[in-house]
Amino acid sequence: MYPELMTNDKALSPLMGLLKIDQLAFLARSDEDEAAIKKQLRLTNANWVEDYVVAEGYVRGGRKAGDLRGQPSRNTAKLMFNYDMGVEIEILRYTEGHNYADEAGIKSCTLCHIGAHVNKGSSINELPPALHHFVFASPIIQEVLTKSHTNEFLLTTGRRYKYTIYDTLPLLGVFMKVIERIEA
């Protein structure tokens, strides 16, 4: 519905000045969870962009296990995006495979991560110093590269993503995701 937010590197959300956060993601585990999140956000009748994603990488063994090495992982997720609030709202629903949400025991219908997109041609190193302080001092809980998408825009452009999720739970009370665009 708002392709300029998906494609234009100049499009900024109102939250971009605050640690460059431009995504709020909520975890769903069922159709009922998806509906409850939409209702809670008053976006029940809004337009949502859907994407089914297969990603490969690794997931850390978990806070409980203390395994910082990570385990190879392949996971599948249903992603739903809405842009009506001026920031990307994501409903994330893992359907297969090992993932950080299961590993961390994140409850359904709650905020599972906040995210920052790294624009084409930019580097993670160009993110604001405040973001580096909170994020890069934290261990990675999941890092994956997307292998396939079903979203028409992504199929047409060939864009893929690298998702790095940092365990900022002790610092921020929520996980932090850095989203790097990989152009075809």
Image: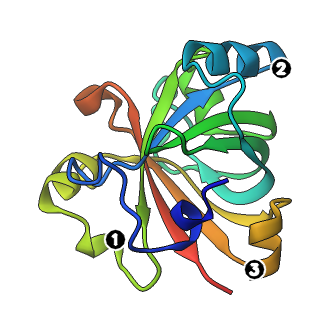
Report the Cα–Cα distance between label 3 and label 2.
Answer: 29 Å
Task: Name the residue at 74% across, 58% down.
Answer: 55
Residue 69 horizontal side relative to residue 92, left or right: left
Amino acid under disc 3 = Gly
Element type where label 2 sits in the image: helix
Amino acid under disc 1 = Ile
Instruction: Say which residue label 3 marks.
Output: 158
Q: Nearer the viewer, mark 2 or mark 1?
A: 2
Task: Name the residue at 86% across, 59% down.
Answer: 150
Q: Nearer the viewer, residue 180 or 47?
A: 47
Instruction: Say which residue label 2 marks.
Output: 31
Residue 78 horizontal side relative to residue 61, left or right: right
Amino acid under disc 2 = Asp
- Residue 163: % across, % down: 55, 58
Residue 115 horizontal side relative to residue 2, left or right: left
Q: Is residue 133 above or below residue 28?
A: below
Element type where label 1 sits in the image: helix
Report the Cα–Cα distance between label 3 and label 1.
Answer: 21 Å
Q: How many residues crowd mark 1 within 10 Å: few (<14), some (14–19), many (20+)?
A: some
Verify CB contact (< 8 Å) between mark 3 and mark 2.
Answer: no
Q: Quadrant of residue 3?
A: bottom right
Mark with earlier residue (2, 1): 2
